[in-house]
Image (cartoon, rainbow, N blue to C red):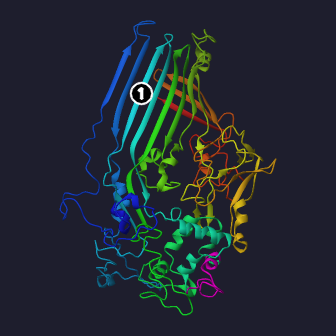
Amino acid sequence: MALLGVSGRSFDQWLQPGIPPDFNQVTQIEFVGPKTSQPDQSIYPNDWNNIGPAVGFAWALPWFGEGKTNIRGGYQISYIGGGHAGNLSNFIFNTPGFVNNAQTQGPIDGTPFDTRSLPGQIPIAPSSLPMQPIPIQKQNFNAAAFDPNYRTPYIQNYTLSITREVTRNLTLDVRYIGTRGIALTGFYDLNAPNVFYNQPLFDAFERTRRGEDVELFDQMFMGLNFVTGLQPVNGTTSRGSAQLRQSTTFRDALANGDYFTLANSLNVFNGTGTGVVTGASGERGTVLRRANKGINVAGGATVAGVPAVPAGLFPENYISANPQFAQSNYWTNSGKSNYHSMQVQGTLRPSHGLNVQGTYVWSRSLETPLVGSNLANGLSTTPAFTNPAEREKDYGLSPNHVTHDFRGFGTYELPLGPGKLLFRDSSGALARIAEGWQTSFIVNLSTGQPVSIASTYLNGTTVSPTGLYAASVPDVVGPFPVKGFGKVDWNGDFGNFFGNRYGKTADPQCAGVETTLRQFCTLQAVTDTTTGQIVLQNPLPGKRGTLGRQTLEMPATWGFDAALSKTIRVAEAKTVQVRVDATNVFNHPQPNLALVTNAPPAGLNINSTVPFGFIQDKGNPNLMGSEKYRQFKATVRFNF
């Protein structure tokens, strides 16, 4: 827990306001392992009890016909302890003290770079010595470490199946398959800004957004001016809240109730214009640091004509727990996943030239964000918890969840040619033309995958949350179906999941924003076009959207592919095959989900500039399973 730095060594002190910083507990980077000063320590603890049993059984039932019914089942534990290399190289070893990027720059005036001058520049002096104490300056460096109690994640697998031979050529399988991921690897940032649990700061944001002037911001910015045209803050005629409302650094986030971004910006603010507070190279957060020393008190800044500000109001951990770093990423066993499925499969072995197999799956897949479905990539993407202090509340349907799925395929040899139903007695050229015809098909039917309706907004070039920390979803304030909302309406290549049923209007909370600040509130709400009633709106600051994550089920998808082939025997061991494959035979559009499920999806983000439910494309012709149009492909093959 040293990642908490000056805020202590216990989660009881995380995101708790009023915890004084202990400067004797700064985070110190050190080498551990063989050939170091601490050979018995390691980056993550050894885990020696990973025993993965696997048991199974098979029983041929003696009833209902000997050998016709079989039951099989099994249970297995599989440990997935690999994959740390990416985490170590990408996160742990990039912590300050491990890596020093030494760089030199050649001529910038366009003259040729002469390598003979390199000996005078090499070795390049490092910007900092390795493993030195990291200053408390909120520098733009990230740190990462493993939970001292970290253990190896594992998967439990359960299977139970019944196989019945209905006839000599027809079998039926009914299976239950389940998996459960336990203690899955995940991480979250311990430096998430303490704004929603810091009531004085939260209330100051709320009141400032409404147009009130708050003493807290007077104390924070006393004597500073970072908005052109305003006088330095003095607590009377020039107020700190007014500076916030008019500052280009803060006004967008403040207007949209994005207190996560607002607090982060305030935490590292060095001032602008004539209100810059200088510090050491790379130091951030000098404005808060100046205010914490006090104004017109011993050890603080001296500003004529303003009231005194006592020291200690804005300690180093006032917003971020560990002011030595920008992010303090804590790798731990924060994830879990669960999958249950019932599968029914029927298989017709070749009978009169027909061979068919069909599989129906009912399933339910749940996980914590970016855990179960991202085990393979080493979780290189930061999990977007709505609130990192309430991670369990984000447990829900996996992005790859599909409730109902049917897959079927088959082949049929046409009864043509010698000895067949038609042209039974043919011979010679007629027999060669009639025989060897075969057709095949593939049918895929599935219900839609779950997606989230987002309530994020674009703050400059950054996607920012509303409500809490990340993964924002709206509040439901009117009738809004998340399932069975109807057929996609297409207009050429474009489409809409909701047709013309919903429109957009300004979010009601913008009306409560101070008049001059209101123009920067870009939040929108979704309305029912038939009644004008608002059905979805952005959550208020500090609130979790009531719609929930992964609650909207995309429209069902289906596809039918077919092929026809003709084999011509030209000699005893030589044949020529002519084959035509047809993809998406019925030309059914397959919405390109990749274009609507990115974070945040444009058409499913209530604050985006595109119509609500907008689909950009019918499908990606280069993406298997998402063909845009019907396609035909012919091939000729010579076998010898």
Residue 507 shows up from this direction: no
Q: Position of residue 313 (x, y in %)?
A: 47, 76
Q: Is residue 535 above or below residue 353?
A: below
Please state which of residues 631 and 108 is positioned toward the viewer in this rendering. Answer: 108
Residue type, mark 1 in image: Thr
Dot 1: what SS? strand
- Dot 1 corresponds to which residue? 159
Magenta stretch holds residue 229: yes
Quarter of the figure with the N terminus: bottom left
**Quadrant of res 77:** top left
**On screen, residue 208 above or below 239:** above
Q: Residue at x 60, y 48 (%)?
A: 452
Q: Please tell me which residue lies in front, 341 or 584.
A: 341
Extent of the magenta region? 223-245
On whether residue 405 falls in the magenta region, the answer is no
Q: Is residue 241 above or below residue 34?
A: below
Going by the image, does 356 lie left or right of 483? Answer: left
